[in-house]
Image (tube, rainbow, N blue to C red):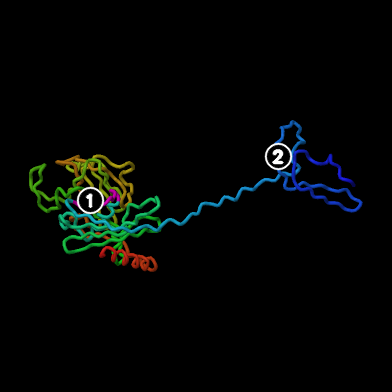
């Protein structure tokens, strides 16, 4: 069949390929068509026979390298007045300070042993690349005189931060030493003391822990509430029956925590009330008592039950990490 010019498309340039078979119709295909400017036309048929579009190169995802490992840093502060002040200067929050005060409570009497010039050192994991840092240090060393006391961070299966001694013994006992973050011991335990309110000599069956009004008071151990209310002298007071043979008293409270009632139960660390100066009190503080077999004992020195040590693979992993951190503290 002869080629008819009427089959060509106007305004197009390119190479013409003819494909013919004997006794068949020839086919014309326009390849590599180049569009040349021409007057716009309202005719919809005036369009390229073949449209060739350049494909955009596939967008390559931005290379994401893993975040850099945390940088371990060691920071130290000199004790001027209190452990809490030194810890705050290192950026520790109140919750962590309370945990560390408890952790060192079995080996250091914060009021008697801690002196001006002692040193508090911490090791942090400082994440890089905008990651969020944990408040809890990996290791803490409290140097009192010529003695050093170390604790190391370990997170339990629930993710709760806990501190252990180097030998894997928990420093968080089943019975906490202190029920409140206090500024000072304003009155000691004593078998015979001149009472500044009633003006007579009598025993002081607990310790007075000075703290601002409204400071949360925590149960030092799990227990059953045997009394919550007002009593002469004690003011607003909570009495707990703890695991035998222990019981505790929390007095001069400004108010009770929500849900605290007679016969109810509390967990160790639970907020049960708030510091006040109700009853026979000359200033805001918590009067705290510990009784063993119904006998009042000095809360700052009485023997308290502790938790078990780490065991098995947990113990091995902890020991390896504690050794590395201990060397860093020595360095």
Of residue 72 and residue 180, the one placed in the foreground of this image is: 72
Residue 173 visible in the snapshot: no
Mark 1 or 2, which is nearer the eye?
2
Q: Label 1 to label 2, Cα distance in Å?
A: 83 Å
Label 1 neighbour load within 10 Å: few <14, some 14-19, many 20+: many
Magenta stretch mostly in which secondary structure? helix
* Mark 2, secondary structure of its residue: loop
The image shows residue 328 at horizontal and vertical percentages of 29, 64
Query: What residue range appears in magenta?
Result: 82-95
- Residue at the right extreme of this rendering: 23
- Residue at the top extreme of this rendering: 42
Residue 113 visible in the snapshot: yes
The image shows residue 194 at horizontal and vertical percentages of 8, 47
The image shows residue 318 at horizontal and vertical percentages of 35, 65
Compare marks 1 and 2 and give the one earlier in the sequence. Answer: 2
Q: Give the label on residue 84, or none.
A: 1
Q: How many marks?
A: 2
Residue at 41 percent across and 57 percent down: it is: 68
Q: Is residue 92 magenta?
A: yes
Tag 1 and tag 2, C-beta contact below 8 Å: no
Q: Kindly identify which residue carries mark 2.
A: 36
Of residue 220 and residue 160, the one placed in the foreground of this image is: 160
* Mark 1, secondary structure of its residue: helix
Q: Is residue 196 magenta?
A: no
Label 2 neighbour load within 10 Å: few <14, some 14-19, many 20+: few
Tell me if residue 331 comes above or below residue 87 in the rendering: below
The image shows residue 19 at horizontal and vertical percentages of 83, 51
Task: Work out which quarter of the rendered image holds the C terminus and state it.
Answer: bottom left
Tell me if residue 329 comes above or below residue 217 in the rendering: below
Residue at 76 percent across and 36 percent down: it is: 46
């Amino acid at each position: 069949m002869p080629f008819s010019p009427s089959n060509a498309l106007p305004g197009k340039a390119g190479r013409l390929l003819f494909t013919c078979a004997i006794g068949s119709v020839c086919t014309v295909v326009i390849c590599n068509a180049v569009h040349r400017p021409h007057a716009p036309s309202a005719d919809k048929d005036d369009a390229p026979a073949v449209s060739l579009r350049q494909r955009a190169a596939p967008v390559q995802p931005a290379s994401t390298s893993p975040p850099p490992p945390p940088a371990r840093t060691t920071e130290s502060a000199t004790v001027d007045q209190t452990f809490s002040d030194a810890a705050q200067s290192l950026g520790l929050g109140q919750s962590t300070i309370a945990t560390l005060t408890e952790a060192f409570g079995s080996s250091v009497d914060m009021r008697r042993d801690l002196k001006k010039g002692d040193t508090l050192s911490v090791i942090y994991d400082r994440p890089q690349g905008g990651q969020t840092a944990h408040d809890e240090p990996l290791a803490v060393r409290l140097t009192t005189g010529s003695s050093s006391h170390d604790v190391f961070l370990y997170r339990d299966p629930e993710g709760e931060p806990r501190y252990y001694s180097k030998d894997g013994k928990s420093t968080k006992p089943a019975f906490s030493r202190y029920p409140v973050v206090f500024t000072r011991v304003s009155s000691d335990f004593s078998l015979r003391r001149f009472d500044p309110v009633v003006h007579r000599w009598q025993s002081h069956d607990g310790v007075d822990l000075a703290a601002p009004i409204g400071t949360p008071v925590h149960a030092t151990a799990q227990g059953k509430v045997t009394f919550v209310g007002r009593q002469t002298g004690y003011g607003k007071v909570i009495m707990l029956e703890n695991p035998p043979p222990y019981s505790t008293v929390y007095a001069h409270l400004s108010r009770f925590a929500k849900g605290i009632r007679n016969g109810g139960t509390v967990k160790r660390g639970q907020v049960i009330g708030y510091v006040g100066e109700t009853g026979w009190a000359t200033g805001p503080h918590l009067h705290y008592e510990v009784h063993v077999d119904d006998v009042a004992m000095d809360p700052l020195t009485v023997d308290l039950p502790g938790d078990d040590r780490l065991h098995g693979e947990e113990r091995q992993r902890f020991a390896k990490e504690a050794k590395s951190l201990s060397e860093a503290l020595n360095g």
